[in-house]
Amino acid sequence: MKNGSNRRQFLFKCGVSGVAAMGAQTVAFSADLEPVSPNDPMAAALGYVEDATTTDVAKFSRYKAGQECANCQLYMGESDSEVGGCPLFAGKTVAAKGWCASWVLKAS
């Protein structure tokens, strides 16, 4: 019975270590990533802008003042960062003050 307990502890520690390492790498890599261009085909389709206040409200009527990437559920940057990752634009960063049509209020 003791061997099973040791194995579980070992696997748990490996899992926790792996998750912590991945989190550290995500933060380190986000600073090295290039910003997504509003002209990128995916960004253009979603109406991505680097400054939410410049959103074309005629085309994207869902936009409301105060919505920006920094308060979006998908934003993976720190609360005080100017840029962060977004799963919609893998390998690139978005502006914290940006916006796109996939914006969803971050859960509090």
Image (tube, grey):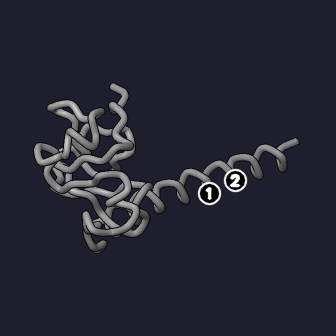
Residue 25 position in % (x across, y down):
40, 66
Residue at image position (40%, 69%) is 91
Mark 2 is surrounded, within 10 Å at the Cα level, by few (under 14), some (14 to 19) or many (20 or more) other residues, namely few
Say which amino acid is labelled 2: Leu
Give the SS element for disc 2: helix
Say which amino acid is labelled 1: Cys
Against 27, is 73 above or below?
above
Against 62, is 95 above or below?
below
Residue 20 position in % (x across, y down):
46, 55
Mark 1 is surrounded, within 10 Å at the Cα level, by few (under 14), some (14 to 19) or many (20 or more) other residues, namely few
Position of 43 compared to 49: left or right? right
Residue 44 position in % (x across, y down):
32, 60
Q: Which residue is mark 2?
A: 11
Can you say which quadrant of the picture contains the C terminus?
A: top left
Q: Which mark is residue 14?
A: 1
Can you say which quadrant of the picture contains the N terminus?
A: top right
Residue at image position (11%, 43%) is 53
